[in-house]
Image (spheres, helix red, strand yellow):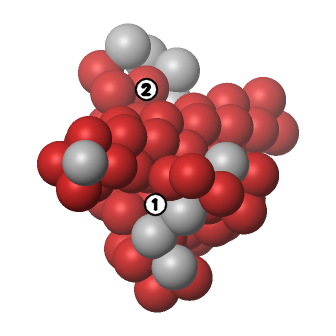
């Protein structure tokens, strides 16, 4: 359940970042793919830091869920910005 939330939040974060930063926009499909990767990475980093959802997979507390959604969305947006910056620098 946690991984699904991370991937969906990452895809949303990637698409929001792509639309809000047109210079780094890769198109809807690539924004989603990069966002999914960034969301998975962001969620895993949060898990390593102990900020993921509850300790066992059966408990879904609101604070952990919100942290997971936010971290995954931000991870997707950050990875999209990095890849968009690299793509822009290479195309010059």
| CA separation in Å, label 2 and label 1 | 16 Å
Residue 46 image label: 2
Is residue 84 visible in the rendered image? The answer is yes
Q: Nearer the viewer, residue 65 or 88?
A: 88
Answer few, some or many: residues within 10 Å of disc 1's Cα (few below 14, many 20 plus, some between 14 and 19).
Answer: many
For this orientation, the residue located farthest to the bottom is 29
For this orientation, the residue located farthest to the right is 62
Tell me residue 60's x, y (percent): 68, 48
Residue 21 image label: none
Q: Nearer the viewer, residue 17 or 24?
A: 24
- The vertical placement of 71 against 88, above or below, is above
Is residue 5 visible in the rendered image? The answer is no
| In this view, the mark in front (2 or 1) | 1
Residue shown at 54% from the left, 63% from the top:
25
Return the residue at label 1. 35
| Residue 61: quarter of image | top right
- Secondary structure of the residue carrying tag 1 is helix
Q: Is residue 83 left or right of residue 53?
A: left
For this orientation, the residue located farthest to the front is 92
Q: How many marks?
A: 2
Residue shown at 55% from the left, 45% from the top:
77
Residue shown at 33% from the left, 27% from the top:
45
Tell me residue 5's x, y (percent): 57, 62
- Secondary structure of the residue carrying tag 2 is helix
For this orientation, the residue located farthest to the left is 90
Answer few, some or many: residues within 10 Å of disc 2's Cα (few below 14, many 20 plus, some between 14 and 19).
Answer: some
- The vertical placement of 6 against 53, above or below, is below
């Amino acid at each position: 359940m946690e991984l699904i939330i991370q991937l969906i939040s990452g895809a949303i974060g990637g698409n929001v970042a792509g639309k809000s930063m047109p210079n780094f926009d890769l198109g809807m499909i690539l924004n989603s793919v990069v966002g999914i990767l960034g969301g998975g990475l962001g969620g895993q980093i949060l898990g390593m830091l102990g900020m993921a959802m509850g300790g066992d997979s059966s408990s879904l507390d609101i604070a952990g869920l919100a942290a997971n959604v936010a971290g995954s969305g931000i991870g997707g947006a950050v990875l999209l910005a990095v890849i968009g910056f690299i793509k822009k620098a290479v195309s010059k």
